[in-house]
Image (cartoon, helix red, strand yellow):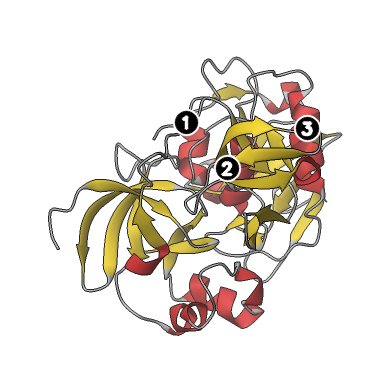
Amino acid sequence: MRGAKMKQIVQAGSSFLWKEPKENKVLAKIKAFPLEALHTFLTDEDTMRLYQESLVDSEVLYGTIVEVITQTDGWSHVIVLDQKSNKHPLGYPGYLPNEVLKPLPPDYAPAKRRIGVIAKEAVLVFDSTTRLVSFGTVLPLVGETADSYQVATPNGPATIAKAFAHVLSDTWAKLPEKIIALAEQFINQPYVWAGISGSGFDCSGFMYSLHRLHGILIPRDTIEQAQQANIVPYSQAQPGDLLLFAYEEGKGEVHHVGLYLGDDEMIHSRTPGSRVMKTKITGSNYEPELAVVARYWQNQPNASQERS
């Protein structure tokens, strides 16, 4: 089917956004697991292949709404509407297997209030079943009890324990501290090229997810993250700022990003084959490459409004 332009919703627990609509060894492995499975079954070899063969650009999670441009030969050419990118004015373009998508339910509408999963993974409880969802999953909030949130999902109403999620809010009290606390649970988490989920992150996907879970939609990739923020000198950096690094001693292309913790230290998802870690800037290989200190947590009007 061509010319299929319409909105659909991700029904898989997570799915990579593939650069090209063609089969490969990692995708074949993913398809051997149920749609509900998260990417925790991928090995280091699998995730390194994603990087070395340049197979993917990003990841989408359960409940993400995408604009479908065309559908043909088992693939959907989509725009991920909540991932800002210079690659397309509406969001991040790429390809998803048709089976990870479904039409928007007739009564499904993004709510003004939404919850985000803040644990590495959490359980959604339906009337007759349960399923795992990943860190970073965002769903419309329709009600709550003392212990749980009631949410809308691609598969109908469900509940999630409040211990594993929070309400995305435009209340910005102690926001840098909250973002840092969320990041620190992932120390030693494996790097995953293009990842934005609890299964693993690339450097910019880590920063994107931490901000999105507080209602702030920053760009998906490092170059745009450097371009679209409030810029401050390193001497005025505050915890919660992004530190962006560029080749050619800070004068070339931006290639890496970390979250500033204060005291000359950052937390970051380092490189393929590495893990989330803390690094002192002074005396490191990153020191001469520091190019931009970007601040997204301050003075962001309508930060909690997500496109749909």
Which residue does the image show at 77% across and 51% down from the upper left? 284
- How busy is the neighbourhood of tag 2: few (under 14 within 10 Å), some, or many (20 plus)? many
Q: Say which residue appears at 81% left-offset and 33% top-offset.
A: 146
Residue under label 2, please give it.
Answer: 138
Instruction: Please state which of the two labelled residues, at mark 2 or mark 1, is closer to the viewer.
Output: 2
SS at circle 1? loop
Label 3 sits on a secondary structure element that is helix
Where residue 232 is drawn, which disc sits there?
none
Is residue 73 among the parts visible in the rendering? Answer: yes
Q: Is residue 185 left or right of residue 82?
A: right
**Other residues around mark 1 within 10 Å, as few (<14) / some (14–19) / many (≥20):** some
- Nearer the camera: disc 2 or disc 3: 2
Residue 264 lies left or right of residue 74; in this view the side is: right
- Looking at the picture, tell me which residue is in the foreground, 99 or 23: 99
Instruction: Compare marks 2 and 3 and give the one earlier in the sequence.
Output: 2
Residue 228 locus on image (x, y percent): 47, 29
Figure quadrant of residue 114: top right
- Cα–Cα gap, marks 2 and 3: 17 Å
Residue 280 in sight: no
x, y percent for residue 285:
71, 54
Residue 84 coordinates in the image, percent (x, y)? 42, 39
Q: Amino acid at mark 3?
A: Lys
Residue topped by disc 3: 178
- Look at label 2 and name its amino acid: Val
Q: Are marks 2 and 1 in contact (CB under 8 Å)?
A: yes
**Image position of 106 with respect to 25: above or below:** above
Q: Nearer the viewer, residue 293 or 29?
A: 29
User: Disc 3 vs disc 1: Cβ atoms closer than 8 Å?
Assistant: no
Q: Earlier in the sequence, mark 3 or mark 1?
A: 3
Give the quadrant of the N terminus: bottom left
The numbered mark, 2 or 1, whose residue comes first in the sequence reads 2
Q: Which circle marks residue 306 in the picture? A: 1
